[in-house]
Every structure is written in structure tokens, then in C-alpha cells.
Amino acid sequence: MTGVVGVTGHRVLEHPIYVVKARLRKLFSNKLKPSLVITGMAIGFDQVVADFCMENNIPFLAAVPFVGQESLWLDPVKASYRNLLDHATEVVVVNTGEYEPWKLMARNQWIVDRSDALVEYLLHEHGGTWDCHNRIVTTGKPVYNIGHSLAGVL
């Protein structure tokens, strides 16, 4: 058992959700067996992982970067987000106050600091996912990139 697994990934997935969830299932059941998953609850991979955890009775912690993260999202996305928060084992608001870009990076560091390993959906070397990747690499903790492992799979 790995213990606490943090996750990070792109907003837009280049693979169907069922393929991503199948890869998560294989990784979580065969190798990591997390006792807790920490997700930053962003649109895309973060929420796919939260949904996967909910479906598979895996405890997950929602690390929300600030209150109102979802304020600019479409109503159906907000409803899905709130449903996921309702099913989280715990919801932690990492920063006080309204949106500021640095709060997303602070949330990434919060996840890295509390994780024993990181599962990422990283296909591009820029943005918040790349930031989180770089933060975890400096710790020497294991990183599992399922985006890379899905290259060429469609």
C-alpha cells in the first residue's frame, strides 16, 4: 500500500474518460493501493479521479485552492463539482480569500507536501500540471504519469 496519493492533470484529456479510469483502476489496484487520494478538484483529470474514487469507494480529499474555485464554470460543471465535494472524505480550502493565480501553485505544493506519491496526467510541459510535476520531482517521491503511458492509445 502506498498511503497517500496526490493527483494532478490537464483540464482537457486527450483520451476518453473510460480509458483514463481503466488505467487508474490498474495502477491503483495492482501497484499503489492508496489509503487516500488528494485531488485539487480542477476541471479535467482532477475531477475524473475524484469521480473514479467515488465509484470505487476510495477515500479522497478535495484540496480546494480557494472558496469559489468553480464560480466561472458552467452550471452543469458546478453541479458535478458540488456533488464530488459532497462525497469527499474531507474538503480542505488551502487558501483564504478570492482567486489569485499563486493560490493554484500553493495548492499544488500543499498536495505534494502531503502525498507519498503522485499520479499525473501530463502531456504538455507547461501550466499547473507541469508546476506540480516539478514540485514533486524535487522531493524524490514516486511519480506515475498515466498520460504518458496512454500515448498512442485511443
Image (cartoon, rainbow, N blue to C red):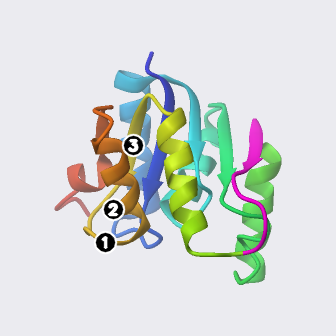
Query: Label 3: which residue?
Result: 119
Query: Label 1: which residue?
Result: 126
Badge 2: residue crowd in 10 Å (few <14, some 14–19, many ≥20): some
Percent from the top left, x then y, of residue 118?
40, 40
What residue is shown at x 19% (from left), y 59% (from top)? 151
Badge 3: residue crowd in 10 Å (few <14, some 14–19, many ≥20): many
- 96 in magenta: yes
Using residue 18 as the reference point, say whether residue 62 is left or right of it: right
Q: Is residue 7 above or below residue 2?
A: below
Query: Label 2: which residue?
Result: 130
What residue is shown at x 53% (from left), y 44% (from top)? 111
**Which element carries disc 1, helix, strand or loop?**
loop
Give the quarter of the image for residue 114: top right
Using residue 75 as the reference point, say whether residue 40 is left or right of it: left
Using residue 1 as the reference point, say whether residue 124 is left or right of it: left
Cα separation between marks 3 and 1: 17 Å
Q: Are marks 2 and 1 in contact (CB under 8 Å)?
A: yes
Percent from the top left, x then y, of residue 128?
43, 66
Cα separation between marks 3 and 2: 12 Å
Residue 42 visible to an observer of this rendering? yes
Q: Are marks 3 and 2 in contact (CB under 8 Å)?
A: no
Query: Which range is magenta?
Result: 88-98
Cα separation between marks 2 and 1: 5 Å
- Three-letter code for the amino acid on which mark 2 is drawn: Trp
Choose the circle earlier in sequence order: 3 or 1: 3
